[in-house]
Amino acid sequence: MPILRQEPLTGEWVIIATDRARRPETFAPQKKEKKAPSPARVDNCPFCYGNEHMTPPEVLAYRDESPKADTPGWSLRVIPNKFPALEQSDNGEGLFIGNFFESCQGYGVHEVIIETPEHNRHLPDLNDYELALVLKSFEERLVSLAGDPKLKYVQIFRNHLREAGASIEHPHCQLLALPFTPPLLDIEYRRCRDYYEEEGRCLLCTLLEEEEKMGDRVVLENDSFLAFIPFAAPLPFTTWIAPRGHASSLEVSQDNWEAKLVPVLKGFLSKLSQKLEDPPYNLYLHLAPLRSEPLSYYHWHMEIIPKLTIVAGLEMATGTYINVSKPEEAAKFLREQKVNVESYK
Amino acid sequence: MPILRQEPLTGEWVIIATDRARRPETFAPQKKEKKAPSPARVDNCPFCYGNEHMTPPEVLAYRDESPKADTPGWSLRVIPNKFPALEQSDNGEGLFIGNFFESCQGYGVHEVIIETPEHNRHLPDLNDYELALVLKSFEERLVSLAGDPKLKYVQIFRNHLREAGASIEHPHCQLLALPFTPPLLDIEYRRCRDYYEEEGRCLLCTLLEEEEKMGDRVVLENDSFLAFIPFAAPLPFTTWIAPRGHASSLEVSQDNWEAKLVPVLKGFLSKLSQKLEDPPYNLYLHLAPLRSEPLSYYHWHMEIIPKLTIVAGLEMATGTYINVSKPEEAAKFLREQKVNVESYK
Ligand SMILES: [Zn+2]
Ligand SMILES: [Zn+2]
Ligand SMILES: [Zn+2]
Ligand SMILES: [Zn+2]
């Protein structure tokens, strides 16, 4: 008998398939081409070390050696996207109200976070210090972009592999600073505010407590962070990573990333890669609006969605998903994978 | 300079890329494997004629010859999905309210509309009469399913090719009757009701008039239907087909499908297939809620979304899309393709 589950955070109902459910191990890509491993440096890759002149000038970099911008010697670089989806220049036009259709200038910021100078080191291959730098760079860019009052929300996201939308192979994240609050964040803010007004506490704090109590959807945890497959996951192996302690955004929490989030993030991505043969995935952060004071009703988190199935007509038509993987089974499958995270240090 | 456009029907803002925009002809799949053409009948295909015993008993069929159910001689069959996402049996449990998480039985109906007994004839290959039967079957199933008061909305959809989610090659549509109004329909109903209350007329009637007046996003039209790429199309070549005359749902309009919708639908799908090398697509209907009286504020339509790009992290995180194809250019590209629709008769 199929079941419907409601996601507390978004309010959406998800169909959890039973008759058509697939066992967790069947989601590993079947006939993946075995590609030759990539080299550490690719001559024509604009993100590789030594090719700094191929990108727009960096807006942030962490350097051990050379203090000179746009030269080698860095361990992380943030650069403007060469083909930005939005631009931070104001032509003074503002909102154009037409007869019926409305449009306006695409104001915003589009940046690339090059996570490592080496072409072939993905997130689980970075050492804890390097991975903490990636998180620190998010924090720094959020603080910096908050200076522009026209920007309302900064979306940080990562597309892993071509099948998940990565057009450049070199490991990187992107950020898009938007001049409005995007619709999915709007829904989360609204629901969390309503819950707070009714219950007097944060919805996600409650949810994390419930998940911990039940335990069967938890993949990995430490004292500070919980990685779990949500109760009403819309797609197979959708995973959320959230701080146990309440914090509405990354930059207001001023956490010790290396000791707290890094082990859980690295552990989870290692499990995913090892158990499902390095699947493509999308990873993104959901944060409070830019420049907001610490909010008691909103709780930041990370969502990771492996691309294991095809989003088809039903989902596009209705916004209602059929998940062909039981969250509890997927979580157990990943939980039981022993990962020696230490070995990556 | 990138631009933002707002979709009047959904309220969503879409980024229309400029720097990273691609010319229409670049969306034809590049290295598509040339497969041998499929035969008219496949021995182990459950949807082929002669294999009627391989499916659950039909709930509707159009037959020229044999009047006997579940035997050959039909031109269209509707059958229950063998692995239904929802089931119409009531275990009396109803909504289960947990401590915090809510779930309930997955009540509903999941059916397959087998469009033709032949394995290798897709929608543009059907003659006008056969294609009209497909639309007539939607209408009949809507009327029949309206008899179950627990069903709130019937989503009719079609996944064309494996890349768009079709797990069985034989040409077919699906319908899923849901026990709730799905979120994307909810948004459309709300916005259309608001517009009607404010302006005293139907939002889509206004939109169609504007599209016709401007003309540069129209792909194809006749006296009764308009096929166009919407102003704020979220994805390349997203196309809507809507009746010019106001009607809130398919079954209340009681149209002469063969004379009116069929030429536009067939013409559009032929253009799409010929200009973009038979791309995968999702097609679906947006209708008024099941059993509603004719509504003056809602206007039914069909949406077709070719799968030409990858929906990636940004879109999944925010619900905000970057369209790398200018709607006006895509519409011109399809509009200028001459299709001899008559030749299919
Ligand atoms: Zn590189
Ligand atoms: Zn909280
Ligand atoms: Zn067949
Ligand atoms: Zn209308």
Image: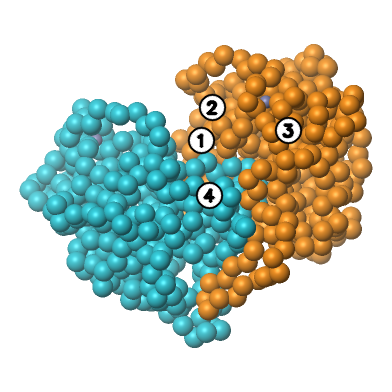
Chain colours: A orange, B cyan
Residue extending farthest left: B65
Residue contact at pointers 1 and 3, CB within 8 angstroms? no
Residue contact at pointers 3 and 4, CB within 8 angstroms? no
Residue wearing tag 4: B21
For residue A19, above or below residue A48? below
- Label 1 residue near ligand 3, CB within 8 Å: no
Residue wearing tag 3: A53
For residue B179, above or below residue A141? below
- Classify residue A139 by image quadrant: top right
* Kind of residue at badge 4: Ala
Residue at 40% across / 37% down in the picture? B29
Give SS at disc 4. loop
Q: Residues within 10 Å of mark 2 (few under 14, many from 20)?
A: many
> Distance between the Cα atoms at labels 4 and 1?
27 Å
Q: Regarding ligand 3, which quadrant of the image does it lie in?
A: top left
Q: Are marks 1 and 2 on the same chain?
A: yes
Residue contact at pointers 2 and 4, CB within 8 angstroms? no
